[in-house]
Amino acid sequence: MITTLQPPIAQPWSAHLWQRLGRYGALIMLATLIVVMSVLEPDTFATGSNVVNVLNQSALSAVIAMGLTFTLVTGEFDLSIGSTASLAGVIACTLMLDDVSIPLAILAGVAVGVVIGLLNGLVVTVLGVNALVATLGIGTVAVGANYAIAGGLPVSLRDPDAFLQISLGRFAGIPYPVYIMVGLAVLAWLLLNRTVLGQSMQAVGGNAVAASLSGIRVNRVRVIGFVICGTLAALTGVLLATRTGSAAVSAGDTYLLAAFAAAFFGSAVLRDGQFHILGTIVGVVTVAVGFNAIALLGMETYWQYLFQGVVLIVGVGVGTVARRRAAA
Amino acid sequence: MNRAIQTKGPAVRDAEEADPGQRPRRLGVSLRMEGISKQFGGARALDGVSISLAPGEILALCGANGAGKSTLVRILAGAEQADSGRILLDGGEVQIDSPRTATELGLSFVHQELNLVPKFTGLQNMAMGLRSTRSLGILDRKALRARAGEVGEMLGHQIVLDVPVERLPVAERWMVSLGRGLMRPAHLVALDEPTASFTDEEAERLYRVIEQLTASGVGILYISHRLEEVLRIADRICVMRNGSVVGSYGSESLDVRTLTHHIVGREVESIERRGPAAPSGERVRLSVRGLGRPPRVRAVDFDLHEGEILGIAGLVGSGRTEIARLLVGADAATEGEMVLDGEPYRARTPHEAIRRGVCLVPEERRSQGLVLADSIESNLQMAAVGATPRMSAVHRPRASRRIARSLIERFAVKSRSPKEAVHRLSGGNQQKVVVGKYVRNEPSVLILDEPTVGVDVGARAEIYGIVAELAATGTSVLMISSDFDELAVCHRVLVVRGGTVVASVEGAGATKDRLTQLCFAHVDDQEIA
Ligand SMILES: Nc1ncnc2c1ncn2[C@@H]1O[C@H](COP(=O)(O)OP(=O)(O)OP(=O)(O)O)[C@@H](O)[C@H]1O
Ligand SMILES: [Mg+2]
C-alpha cells in the first residue's frame, strides 16, 4: 500500500506567521500587558502579593466561566448562570440563618445549580426548545424564586466569621479560592480531554448528526453539559457570598457577560476558535490583570468596561483574521 | 453587462411565461483557463493548469481524489481565488472575484458538496441568487415554480419544492441542488460529480438534459469518477494528477482500462464478480422480519449471514436509506422483529446498535459523517467513543493517534498529518475517513450507504478490498449502492422498491440490466405517497 502521509511541504513564511499569530495572539496580548505593567509599576504590580491578589480575583469568574465552557463545547449556551449564582447564594445564606450547618447549606446551594442545569438540559433536549429561550426562561424563573425567598433584600448572616473563612482563609499564603480554581481547572481539563464524555461533548458540538450516528448519546451529553454549567454557576454564587457574608438578589448578574467574554476570548487562545478550559482561564486572567492594572494606575472604573470590551473584540478578532490569512 | 446572459437558459427555453426577459441571441462562450495555480497553506492544489472549452463542448476532468478538480471548478465559480493564472471568456480576460460575478457572466455550477440553505424550501434554494426572475425586486414565485417544475420534469423526477431541505432525504437534496444548477440561464454549466449517488436510469435523464444544453451551444465542464459515463458523454477528457494536467484525450481514443491507467498511474484490477457461492458461514447473523416504519418502509424481510456481503439496489426514494436507518436505530422502527446472533435485537438508538456491533456508514459525509473542523484523528475516533458504554471511561490520545495513523495508511488517505482538519481534504479522501471511522470499531454488521460516492477508481478498489477482507473474517456487510456495477462485489443483492424488499438475486445473476429491470417493475402500482 502506498504511504500517503506526505512529507511536510515548506509553507510560505507569511502563512506561517499568520498561523502563529492566530494561535498565540491572545497570549501575546496578555504577556505585553504584564511586561508593560511590570515596567510602569515595578513596586506594586510585579510583586508576589499582587500576583496572588490577581489570581484570587480571577477565581470566581474562572469557576463560572469554566462551567459555561462545557455548554459552549457541546454547541449550546446558558444565559441562566447569573441568576443561578444569585439564587444559590441566597438559598445558602437563608438556610444558614435558619441554623443549618455551613457544609449542608453550601451543599444545598450547589444542589440548586444541579437542578437548574438539569431543567435547562431537559427543556432543550426533550422539549426541543432553543437554548436561548430555554435558559432565559429558566433563568427568569430562578430570579422569581429568588425574590420569593429573599423578598428582594440582601440576606446577611448574623455571625459570618466561619463562613467568611472560606474566602479569607489561606494555605501557604495563598487564599483558598485560588486552590479551588486550580483544582477545578485540572478536573475540568481532564474531563474534557481525557474522558470519553469530554470527547463526546466535543463531537456533539462539532456535528450533532454525525455524533449521533457514531453512537454518541447526544441528548444525554448535552444535559450533562448543562448540569456541569449550572453546578459551577451555583458554586460561584455560594463562594461569592463567602466574601461578604451576605447574598444579594442580583449578586451574580455581572458574571454572566464576564463568563461569556472570557470563554469567547479563550476560544482564540492556542486553538482555532474552539472553546477549551485553558483558553477560558487565560481569558479570565487577562481581564483580571487588566482590571488590576487600571486600579493600580489610578484610572477611573469606567476604563474597566472599555478594557473588557476591547480585549474581547481584539482577542477574537485578531484570531479570526489571522486564521483567514493563514488559510489563504 | 451582457443583457442576454440574464435571460433564460436553454433548460427552460419553452417556458415563455417563466421569464419575462429577452431571448438570448446566442448561447455558449468559449472558456480558457491558463496557468492556474493555487496553494493552500503549504499544499499545492493546482500547479499551472490550463484547460479550454468550446461552446457546446463537453470537457470531462478526471483524476484521483485530491488531484485538484474541484479546486479548479471553485476558482471558476469565484468561490476560491487563484494565486496566478488567467481566465478568458470568448477571448477576453475576466476577473471572477465572487460567486455572484460568475453567475453574472453566465456560468452555472453544481458543486460536489451540497450547498443548500437547510431552512429554505427546495424552491427557495433553487431561486437563490437568480436575478432574472425578479422584476422590481419582487420574486415572481409563479414563474419560478413553473420553471423548477419543468427542470424536474426533464430530470424525470418531481423535485420537492415546498419542504425545507433539511427535512428531505439526502437524495432529494441532491435533486434540488442539481435542479438549481440547471434552471438558471447559463452559457456554461460545470457539474462536479452530479451523478455520484444516482442509478444509471437517473443518470441517463441527466445526460439527456446535458445533450439538450450542448445542442444549444452551452459548454459543459464535467467531473466524475464513473469512467464509463465519462467516456460516453464527454468530447474530450483532461486527466489531472497532483494539481497538474497530465494529459488531454479525445474520448473515442480511450477505454476504461487505459483511462484508469492514466488516472491512477498503475493497473487496477476490475471488480471480480462473486459467485453465488455461500459465504464463509451459513449461520444467520441478522434476521429481519416485517420491519417497517410506514409510510416509507414496510414489511422488510431478509436474513444476513455471517461473512456475507449483501447488496441493496434501489432507486432514489425507494426506501433503501430508510431501511438502513431503521437497522441502526437512527429512526425507530414501528413494526417488526430483528434477531442478532440469536438474541432479540431492538435498535432504538444508534448507540445501542453500535454497542451490539451494528454500524452504519451514512450516505452524506459532510452533514452526517464528519466534524469538518476537527482533525482526521478525532473524526476517526468518534465511533469508538460512541461505542463506549461508560462515559467516565478514560480517553487515551496517544493510542487514538496510533490507530488513526494506521487507518490513514490502510485507506491511503491523502493528507499531511493526522491532525489536519478534514475540511481541508478532497471529497474522496473525506469519504475514506468516514468509512475508516466505522471500520475501526470492527463491527459484526457493517452497513455501507453509498460507500464509494466521490471515491476514485483506485481507492474504490481498495474499499472493495477492505469490504472483502472484513467479510472473509466473518463481518456481515450490507452495501447500498446506486452504482449497480459495483454491486458485483456482493454475494447476493436485495432489490428495494416502494419501501420494501421485492426481490433477492444471487451474485452471478445480479447484473446491471437485471437489477435495473427489477427496480423499475410495476413502479406505478407500487408507488408510495
Ligand atoms: N480549503 C482547503 N484547505 C487546504 N487544502 C485544501 C483545501 N481545499 C482543497 N485542498 C487540497 O487541495 C487538493 C485538491 O483538492 P480538490 O478538492 O480540488 O480535489 P479533487 O480533485 O476534487 O478530489 P476528489 O475527487 O476527492 O473530489 C487536495 O489535496 C486538498 O487536500
Ligand atoms: Mg472534488
Image: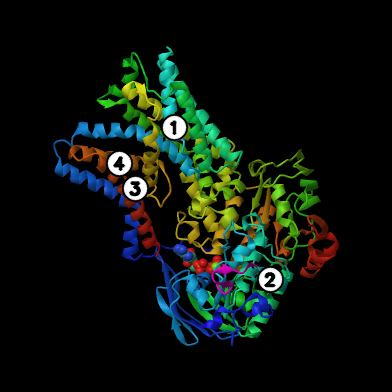
Q: Residue furthest top?
A: A99
Q: For the point 78% across and 52% down, which residue is it?
A: B295
Residues A270 and B217: in front is B217
The magenta segment is: B131-141
Inter-mark Cα distance, 4 to 1: 22 Å
* Disc 3 element: helix
The answer to whether B374 appears left or right of B453 in the picture is left
Which amino acid type is shown beneath numbered disc 3? Leu
- Give x and y (percent) for residue B464: 65, 61
Give the vertical position of B394 relative to B207 (above or below). above
Residue B386, quarter of picture: top right
Residue B121, quarter of picture: bottom right
Q: Which mark is residue A287?
A: 4
Q: Which mark is residue A312?
A: 3
Could you classify mark 2 by the number of other residues whose Cα lies within 10 Å: few (under 14), some (14-19), or many (20 or more)?
Answer: some
Residues B227 and A126: in front is A126
Q: Which residue is mark 2?
A: B146
Q: Which chain does tag 2 point to?
A: B
Please identify, in this view, whether the residue under mark 4 or under mark 1 is nearer the observer: 1
- Give x and y (percent) for residue B393: 53, 36
Inter-mark Cα distance, 2 to 4: 58 Å
The answer to whether A178 appears left or right of B415 in the picture is left
- The reply to whether the residue tagged 4 has its Cβ within 8 angstroms of ligand 1 is no
Inter-mark Cα distance, 1 to 3: 23 Å
Of callouts 3 and 4, the N-terminal one: 4
Which amino acid type is shown beneath numbered disc 4? Val
Both labels 4 and 1 in a single chain? yes
Q: Which residue is mark 1?
A: A83
Please identify, in this view, whether the residue under mark 2 or under mark 4 is nearer the observer: 2
